Image (cartoon, coloured by chain):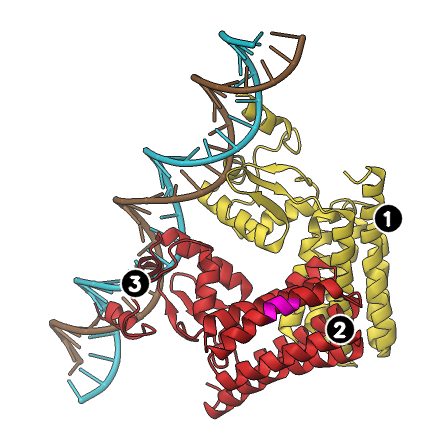
Chain colours: A yellow, B red, C brown, D cyan
Amino acid sequence: MAARAASRESAPTPGLAPHPPPSRNLAAVIEEEIVLGWLQPRERLVEEDLAARYGVKRHAVREAIFALERIGLVERVPNKGAVVRMLRAVDVEQIYAVREALEAFAATLIPLPAADLIARLETIQERHSAAVESDDARAAFRANMDFHDTLFSACGNPHLAEAIKSFAQKVHGVRSYTAGDPAYLARAREEHMVMIEALRAGDRERLMTLCKQHLGPSRDIYIAMLARRQGR
Amino acid sequence: MAARAASRESAPTPGLAPHPPPSRNLAAVIEEEIVLGWLQPRERLVEEDLAARYGVKRHAVREAIFALERIGLVERVPNKGAVVRMLRAVDVEQIYAVREALEAFAATLIPLPAADLIARLETIQERHSAAVESDDARAAFRANMDFHDTLFSACGNPHLAEAIKSFAQKVHGVRSYTAGDPAYLARAREEHMVMIEALRAGDRERLMTLCKQHLGPSRDIYIAMLARRQGR
DNA sequence: GTCGCCAGGATTGTTGACAATCTTGTTGGA
DNA sequence: TCCAACAAGATTGTCAACAATCCTGGCGAC
């Protein structure tokens, strides 16, 4: 009884019962919830609760949780359950170090000039800008993801692009602290613009610098927040 | 009936029915089978067959296959099943390009001198050498894996080490062509020795060069073999 | 009053059966 | 003889019930 109550207490938001997306890739749906902060780090993921919430069977939730565990977004303890993974500051730093290395490598491979790539990025960026201006965190997240996917896929090495995406996913849990922040989103939008500009100028050095600078803010915000919380 | 027969025909080896490892991490077991060539690229992985073979329930096989799919070792088609992934030459090249980048990055991070690391590597290398000399492919594979895990874990960034391991796993399917070759194993042994030597000398440049050279052979062998088969 | 043990309940893990889907082989007709 | 629809079998996907495990809270002994 008490266990049940505890699980209820730790529920993300008061009225979270129903939910629009019935089917689709459940893991991706849950991932988005984490990014948007509806499911917060340290929060327990009770299989039956999620099944009821998303209107699917427990079995489907189970598989999604396994998938998220492989990605590194949730942590599972045998016979105890899964929680949204709480990254320590050192983890965030280390993951971002790898991201920098991977993205820098990819940036060296992108063929320049890249007229076609620029066109596609501009289209995506329009969506992103619109989402930022209308404070639509979910749409901004999706467009942002598309932007980086498209950019790094242009390196011509799909395995590298996938690794970059995978490492970005690892820190999705920490992104909930910036995903809804208008100032941060506006900054990201500006940086995307400048990256497109660098592509257009064929300035690879500048592109690599921008990629690196683009990674910094969310990392620093999260680490600062952890420090405030005394490294909980 | 015919489908069943076909599945039997494509069975890896004539007498594969029983099997020693009953439990343990099933995905790792299957992975080893792939590396050792008992399960070959393009071979179908029928859930019930594997369940019977390893003495586990189908459900466990299912999860293992999902895990292997995420790693990239097997390919799954909905409602049709999974097969050991057949990498194209271009895939192999691309994966190895990322491996080079990741391992080079890790090599820059390993603190030198590394007395403790050297000691551990020497212990592992003894096992590897013994396995190579007695033509024990399975033991050689395990020791080899340990060697590289230990080496790159020393970079102090576990997420990077995991990425390196994960990319090594992606090409495990292609390793079956070298895993049992005494000449190749002997060469690997020598290279490990030299790497330890470089560590002892604190020569980071040399270590990085050796890591890169160590990757080449298996890639080239596989690509050459694919070329012979006309890029099947 | 505190500590350790025991019972109840919640949650995860496992199993077997059933449903859906695809593949293959066959039959009937042009 | 060739093609298309059909049927059987094999295989994967889904489900609901059961078993195992762990946490919580209460009760009794020291």
Query: Which residue is at 61% across, 41% downward?
Result: A83
Q: Residue A183's mark?
A: 1
> Left of B149 or right of it: where is A140?
right
Residue A118 can be seen, yes or no: no
Chain to which mark 2 belongs: B
Rendered view: B109 above or below D25: below
Q: Name the front one of labels 2 and 1.
A: 2
The overriding secondary structure of the stretch rendered in magenta is helix
Q: Are marks 3 and 2 on the same chain?
A: yes
Chain to which mark 1 belongs: A
Q: Nearer the viewer, residue A78 or A105?
A: A78
Q: CA distance from mark 3 to mark 2?
A: 46 Å
**As rendered, which of A179 and C11 lies closer to the eye?**
C11
> Could you give the CA–CA distance between mark 2 and mark 1, rounded to whole angstroms?
50 Å
Q: Hey, which quadrant is residue D5 in on the image?
A: bottom left
Q: Is residue A173 left or right of residue A77?
A: right
Closer to viewer: mark 3 or mark 1: 3
Q: Which residues are magenta?
A: B121-125
Question: Tag 3: residue type?
Answer: Pro
For the residue carrying disc 1, how many other residues have a C-alpha within 10 Å: few (<14), some (14-19), or many (20+)? few
Q: Residue A100 in the image: x percent, y percent?
A: 78, 65
Q: Which residue corresponds to mark 2?
A: B200
Instruction: Indicate the chain on which mark 3 is placed.
Output: B
Residue B18, labelled with which disc?
3
* Residue for point 59% across, 29% down: A7
The image shows residue B18 at horizontal and vertical percentages of 30, 63
Q: Amino acid at mark 1?
A: Ala
